[in-house]
Image (spheres, grey):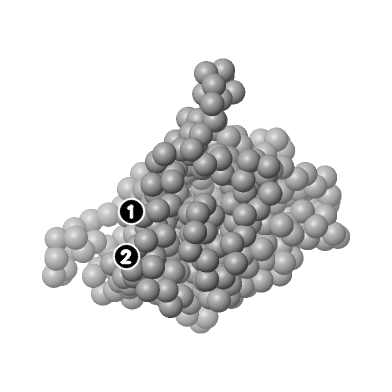
């Protein structure tokens, strides 16, 4: 189903006269260069390297196939591993999170512009695995209009502002990436470990997907939070005591592991990529982000991180709502989940408990 070539037909939404509801739409989809489009492969028979024009009607029946309602949120209907929502509320959270990460980490690692430079030799191609709201891949498509940008996730990305050189494809990364081998100059992954069964194997797939000289750029976090000394706070199973925010995350981590997600992947990324024979010039970066504006002082450093902490607090409070289906599906009672979330939100609002999240990024080049 996935291919790195596309065509010149425009990406568009139209009213569907055969729909039962006003919200039903259809999208024309194609796969040649310069077309913004969405494509889906809901079964293995469609996961092919051969590009074939496709039209997908995004009617209520298709939506019903792609999504399911669980504990009041819209979740993807294809992966039993990834159990966070894919609804509008979650996509809005991811958009705001992306803006925050750009302020902290920058949009791209230093080699990105060089790798993406138009050299008249090939059309540069970028792959975003687990694209979420699509903010990152759409920014890349706008910044590098000569490139082919492909976003992969468990649900279709259907932004009306999708650039013409960008397309969205629906697939489960856990099924493998053989259909992408040798097709891309950049592969990007950010905060997808909860939906990945074997991240070490994914790194090897990415090595094969990249063209010689290509760039891998992966960012994850270890599913725990740390105190002022930057030591992880890991409450034992069955705990119910402050600090409440690390406690909430400890239950989320156990739920992710039970589902089969690779919750510890971030702590191994540097090792896995450094030891892979395909990669060179490996760089590890870490970013300690406060979970609330708890820093004291009016100096520029404190002001900057308190601004980031305010955004991180809002992001985390929204994330706890998004994580509710995950925790309830883990067997915790609604009363228990509500109590932890309520206490954690209050803890974040008071901004008196110094807690960090560690964001770990690794980038490297594929050997020529």
Q: Is 308 located above or below residue 12 in the figure? A: above
| Residue 73 tag number | 2
Q: Quadrant of residue 102?
A: top right
Compared across the picture, whether 19 is left or right of 221 comes to left
What residue is at 25 percent from the left and 68 percent from the top?
59
Picture quadrant where residue 42 is located: bottom left
Q: Residue furthest top?
A: 299
User: Quick one: 80 or 37, which is closer to the camera?
Assistant: 80
Dot 2: element: strand
- Which residue bears the numbered disc 1? 89
Judged from the image, the secondary structure of the residue bearing numbered disc 1 is: helix
Q: Identify the residue at horizontal 52%, vertical 18% (top origin).
A: 298
Q: Viewer-proximal residue, 216 or 17?
A: 216
Circles 2 and 1: CB atoms closer than 8 Å: yes
Give the image location of residue 140, x and y in percent: 53, 41
Q: Is residue 34 above or below residue 201?
A: above
Q: Position of residue 264 (x, y in %)?
A: 66, 63
Relative side of 17 to 119, left or right: left
Residue at position x 48%, y 30% in the image: 307
- Res. 256 visible in picture: no
Q: Is residue 292 left or right of residue 215?
A: left
Q: Position of residue 84 (x, y in %)?
A: 44, 64
From the viewer's side, name the closer residue of 207 and 284. Answer: 284
Position of 74 relative to 279 (above/below) = below
Q: Sequence order check: which comes first, mark 2 or mark 1? A: 2
Q: Quadrant of residue 110?
A: top right
């Amino acid at each position: 189903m996935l291919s790195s070539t596309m065509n010149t037909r425009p990406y568009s939404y139209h009213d569907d006269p055969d729909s039962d509801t006003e919200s039903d739409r259809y999208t024309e989809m194609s796969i040649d260069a310069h077309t913004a489009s969405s494509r889906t492969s809901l079964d293995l028979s469609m996961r092919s390297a051969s590009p074939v024009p496709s039209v997908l009607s995004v009617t209520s029946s298709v939506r019903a196939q792609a999504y399911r309602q669980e504990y009041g949120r819209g979740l993807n209907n294809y992966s039993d591993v990834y159990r966070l929502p894919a609804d509008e509320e979650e996509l809005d959270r991811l958009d705001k999170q992306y803006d925050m990460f750009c302020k902290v980490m920058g949009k791209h690692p230093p080699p990105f512009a060089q790798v993406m430079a138009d050299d008249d030799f090939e059309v540069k191609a970028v792959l975003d695995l687990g694209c979420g709201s699509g903010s990152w891949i759409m920014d890349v498509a706008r910044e590098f209009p000569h490139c082919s940008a492909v976003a992969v996730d468990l649900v279709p990305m259907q932004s009306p502002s999708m650039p013409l050189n960008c397309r969205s494809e629906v697939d489960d990364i856990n099924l493998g990436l053989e259909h992408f081998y040798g097709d891309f100059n950049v592969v990007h992954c950010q905060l997808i470990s909860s939906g990945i069964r074997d991240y070490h194997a994914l790194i090897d797939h990415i090595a094969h997907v990249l063209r010689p000289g290509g760039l891998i750029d992966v960012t994850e976090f270890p599913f725990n939070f740390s105190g002022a000394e930057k030591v992880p706070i890991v409450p034992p199973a069955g705990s119910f005591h402050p600090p409440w925010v690390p406690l909430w995350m400890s239950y989320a981590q156990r739920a992710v592991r039970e589902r089969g997600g690779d919750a510890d992947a971030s702590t191994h990324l540097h090792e896995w990529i450094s030891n892979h024979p395909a990669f060179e010039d490996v760089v590890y970066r870490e970013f300690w982000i406060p979970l609330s504006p708890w820093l004291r002082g009016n100096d520029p450093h404190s002001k900057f991180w308190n601004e980031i902490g305010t955004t991180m607090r809002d992001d985390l409070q929204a994330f706890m709502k998004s994580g509710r289906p995950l925790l309830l599906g883990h067997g915790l009672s609604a009363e228990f989940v509500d109590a932890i979330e309520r206490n954690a939100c209050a803890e974040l609002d008071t901004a008196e408990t110094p807690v960090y999240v560690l964001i770990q990024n690794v980038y490297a080049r594929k050997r020529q």
